Image (cartoon, coloured by chain):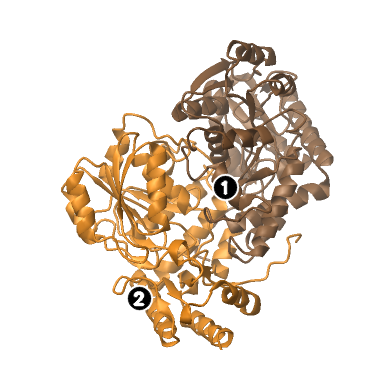
Chain colours: A brown, B orange
């Protein structure tokens, strides 16, 4: 082995999350061809399991061959054409990125802004839609990784269901850690990444399109600006019973890993998995508050799998975070945007969402901040 | 292990190529964070090794977080803006795809076409450039995976070097199996994939930009249509001494595998590696001709690592290929476009480029066609 030595870390940052031995073993199984019936069967089973994880019957559900940001771009680029209007909830880094992607596509972006750390109030989103009823898409971030905010989806989804406007949701940090309920929430396009609550290395990005999103793809006046991410082309390869037409070479070994991650999740049971994420997140947040930390996200709308919190007394976070990595081999993330410099972002995701992770982190913090 | 059983195959198709045990082991090393100094050191070393493999001093050399097609799109999307002119050599599937990507970007595409299986004559490319001296880019496919043609690059590169036009080259099936000589050939943008002659699973795609390509990125009037593939943003993360600004989560474990693949290549020696690909490719082509097969690519311009050949007597290829997979667990590819139905595409790439591969394949063919 000629790689540099790699010292393992306990990954409690905003991602990647810890990858279990079972998933690493799956990753290293023999590579076969992307048109091999063995591989296609695994991909079909991945897609079926993703549907259950997403809570959807959408036929067009598959992993994009890139990271979560690639699926984010695929979602936007397949729905929007130049000149379309897109309403975007912007209350953190990933909402800002949705807006930026919309602008690059040549769409008119109507931002509905809220302070970082607060939700975008559903009634404000609905009001923006009433002002712009011809908007092609309303886009919201379910779990804002930059702030730890859990965005309500139900009211906006119910409102849009009776209109011509499509509902697009970023579930990068929610899928696998909490219900996304794509169908129940009337979501038309939803994307995620493998390296958060699914506990799989980064490199694939689950994406799902509702029948009306598929209809939108079919009735575009111009092709998707991205050939690589064009769902109309991808559907001929990824769909069960499709022609399996060659488009690009799928990341074979990453698909093995994602398959194993989804099997592990169903072995645990999805409800139990979501409850575990909730329980350990609550435990961490209680422990931090007891120690004088200030939770950054709005009360009542805090994610369990991603906690952002400011250190006691407003002290600078970076030196403590560096010591945590150096002395305890625990990785957490720093704040972004207005939370930079003072806030940690702690992920308890996938295999990392355990009481032991919480205990290790709080014990280390007790020493480092003593 | 809950994966479906995976029966190993001898991968002698157009990719993926066989992945060695060392690389699979590297792939399964512990996942760390994408901003971890351990990971950044591995990425820096990958980039240094890619420069040597490409034959370039280009500072901006890194793997795109997707497959070869993602890097193809990154190359085109970063160089071109709507209204630009791009001259594209089209003599197979991958040249056609370059043209399609150019059109989607809104560029004016000037195709220089040649029959599938023949090179695009350099003088015709140079003539097209003289007719369109304001063209932003000339794009050629070095190793046309759909036909097995090896495209000459030197004359076109030398011609363009004295002009304002950038030279863009697809090296998906050449990098790691034959010299690409980016700097000597005056190539400005060059991309590849991991799953061909580098012998690494699919999922990353090496890309390099010359200083004048970087200047082009800096002086664009509009940002790259793709946020995910925007080299101006990526440079802040991937570059040695860069700010390491978060852009997306790099595919950590795939980077370990690519690193190991590049180490293995340098252990063998690049010249020895290229000679090995040439030697076994010659051996296969000789063996096929002796058996009455007809080589599809133009004489004098045949790739060694990818051979396309029609079966004796013009018989249909698909049943024999299916039997080869079923009875011998050997995968080869079928022809594309005008070569569909009659031609096999045989890859002898990376760890698959051995005399033993040739012997196994020819022995099987002797039985199947007896």
Q: Quadrant of residue A161?
A: top right
Indicate the quadrant containing the C terminus of chain B: top left, top right, bottom left or bottom right: bottom right
Number of disc labels? 2
Query: Where, by quadrant of the figure, is residue A69 drawn?
Result: top right
- Seen at 71% across and 28% down, the residue is A303
Give neighbour class at mark 2: few <14, some 14-19, many 20+ (Cα, 10 Å): some
**Is A170 situated above or below B273?**
above
Q: Chain of mark 1?
A: A
Dot 1: what SS?
helix
Residue A268 vertical placement versus A276 (above, below) = below
Which residue occupies the foreground of this view, A215 or B143?
A215
Question: Residue A234's mark?
Answer: 1
| Residue bearing mark 2 | B275
Coordinates of residue B134 in the picture (x, y in percent): 21, 40
Q: Mark yes or no: residue A197 visible.
A: yes
Eyeballing the image, is B132 above or below B200? above
* Pick the front one: A288 or B228: B228
Q: Secondary structure at mark 2?
A: helix
């Amino acid at each position: 082995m000629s790689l540099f030595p790699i010292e393992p870390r306990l990954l409690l940052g905003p991602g990647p999350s810890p990858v279990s031995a079972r998933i690493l073993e799956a990753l290293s199984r023999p590579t076969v061809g992307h048109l091999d019936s063995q591989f296609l069967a695994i991909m079909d089973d991945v897609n079926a399991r993703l549907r259950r994880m997403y809570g959807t019957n959408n036929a067009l559900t598959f992993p994009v061959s890139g990271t979560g940001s690639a699926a984010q771009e695929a979602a936007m680029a397949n729905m929007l054409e130049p000149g379309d209007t897109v309403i975007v909830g912007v209350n953190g880094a990933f909402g800002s990125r949705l807006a930026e992607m919309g602008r690059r596509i040549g769409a008119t972006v109507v931002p509905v802004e809220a302070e970082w750390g607060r939700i975008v109030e559903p009634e404000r989103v609905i009001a923006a839609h009433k002002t712009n009823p011809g908007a092609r898409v309303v886009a919201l971030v379910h779990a804002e990784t930059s702030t730890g905010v859990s965005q309500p989806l139900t009211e906006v989804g119910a409102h849009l269901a009776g209109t011509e406007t499509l509902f697009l949701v970023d579930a990068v940090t929610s899928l696998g850690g909490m219900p996304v309920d794509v169908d129940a929430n009337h979501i038309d396009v939803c994307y995620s990444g493998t390296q958060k609550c699914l506990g799989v290395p980064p490199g694939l990005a689950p994406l799902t399109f509702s029948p009306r999103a598929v209809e939108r793809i079919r009735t575009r006046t111009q092709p998707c600006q991205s050939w690589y991410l064009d769902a109309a082309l991808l559907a001929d390869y990824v769909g069960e019973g499709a022609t399996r037409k060659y488009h690009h070479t799928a990341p074979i070994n990453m698909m093995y890993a994602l398959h194993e991650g989804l099997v592990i999740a169903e072995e645990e049971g999805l409800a139990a998995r979501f409850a575990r994420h909730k329980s350990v997140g609550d435990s961490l947040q209680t422990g931090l508050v007891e120690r004088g930390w200030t939770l950054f996200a709005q009360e009542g709308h805090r994610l369990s799998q991603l906690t952002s919190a400011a250190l006691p007394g407003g002290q600078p976070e970076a030196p403590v975070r560096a010591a945590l990595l150096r002395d305890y081999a625990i990785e957490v993330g720093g704040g972004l945007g207005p939370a930079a410099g003072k806030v940690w972002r702690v992920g308890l995701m996938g295999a990392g969402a355990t009481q032991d992770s919480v205990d290790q982190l709080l014990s280390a913090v007790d020493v480092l901040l003593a």
